[in-house]
Image (cartoon, rainbow, N blue to C red):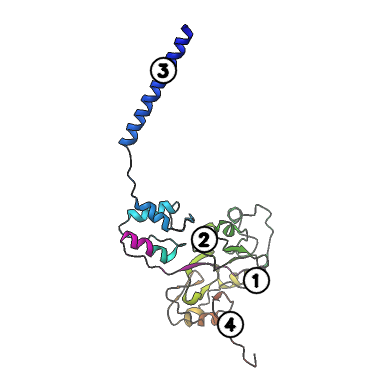
Amino acid sequence: MLLDSTLLYTVLILCAVGVIAAALLYVVAQRFRVEEDERIDVVAAKLPGANCGGCGSAGCRNFAEKLVASEDLAGLFCPVGGAATMKDVADYLGRAPVEKAPQTAVVRCGGSCAKRPHTNLYDGAASCAMSAMLYGGQTGCIFGCLGGGDCAAACNFDALSMNALTGLPEVDQTRCTACGACAKACPKLLIELRNKGFRDRRVYVSCRNKDKGGVARKSCAAACIGCGKCVKACAFEAIALADNLAYIDSNKCRLCRKCVAECPTGAIVETGFPALKQTKDG
């Protein structure tokens, strides 16, 4: 009988403690409750939901929170959704839409296996990040692609793949969303986001070798040698030469392609242009 009473009292005490704890938790929850703007859910639903981090936020919902909280959308842009998505969001929030030219990733290395022969053999982990910490690469060019495929692994849209023949990554422009994940993954900073250009036509220097001309040319047949011929050929001042390396400003470039013809090593790449018609003699 005494045991039954003890057990009963124990159960009642535990129930009372549970009720008191629940009441305290309810009071605390109500006291420190944070009201969330209902517009966040609406804006998040308008975003593509890729959670790629290309906007600089920890996922689409976090980006939606920033958009709702910001009075000015300048500096906030979703590369996956693009201008159309940002306009939809801006219209809903009653803000000025963000204008930004569509971009795509380009690989700034033309040092294929044929143009950049190996001088040693790397036998470590198949990772660009790992090999970059250990040494300069398997060729004489310490600025070139390491071929580990970190960029392809970082892409959530299957827009990057490694070409087994050239040893270089290739970008599928139809799938690239310009999220920038591949650019962040490359330890050599060889992948750059550039404006897609008129009719998806682009001209850029596919090299980041900063060695002097003779040294650069010896390590890679496709290297920029800093000769400056492209700078002189450009009538729009779109090309600058620094640290023995040419760079083309896509905002100034008028796609005339005179620089392409002047480059002695073929380091300047043109993409998206129609093939030149062959003459009867050619």
The nearer-to-camera label among 3 and 2 is 3
Amino acid marked by disc 2: Ala
State the separation of the CA atoms marked 1 and 3.
Answer: 83 Å
Q: Residues within 10 Å of mark 1 (few under 14, many from 20)?
A: some
Q: Are marks 2 and 1 in contact (CB under 8 Å)?
A: no
Amino acid marked by disc 3: Leu
Q: Are marks 1 and 3 in contact (CB under 8 Å)?
A: no
The answer to whether 25 is drawn above or below residue 195 in the figure is above
Q: At 62% across and 88% down in the image, what residue appears?
A: 278
State the separation of the CA atoms marked 4 and 1.
Answer: 24 Å
Residue that carries the numbered disc 4 in the rendered image: 275
Q: Does residue 164 appear anywhere in the picture?
A: yes
Residue that carries the numbered disc 3 in the rendered image: 12
Q: What label sits on residue 62 in the rendered view?
A: none
- Residue 183 covered by magenta stretch: no
The earlier-in-sequence mark between 2 and 4 is 2
Q: Is residue 185 left or right of residue 34?
A: right
Q: Is residue 143 left or right of residue 85?
A: right
The nearer-to-camera label among 2 and 1 is 2
State the separation of the CA atoms marked 2 and 1.
Answer: 23 Å
- Residue 95 covered by magenta stretch: yes
Amino acid marked by disc 4: Ala
Residue that carries the numbered disc 2 in the rendered image: 183
Q: Are marks 4 and 3 in contact (CB under 8 Å)?
A: no
Spot occupied by residue 122 in the image (x, y as percentages of width and height): 67, 56
The answer to whether 271 is drawn above or below residue 28 in the figure is below
Spot occupied by residue 179 in the image (x, y as percentages of width and height): 49, 61
Instruction: Tell me the magenta residue range.
Output: 87-116
Q: Quadrant of residue 32?
A: top left
Residue that carries the numbered disc 1 in the rendered image: 115
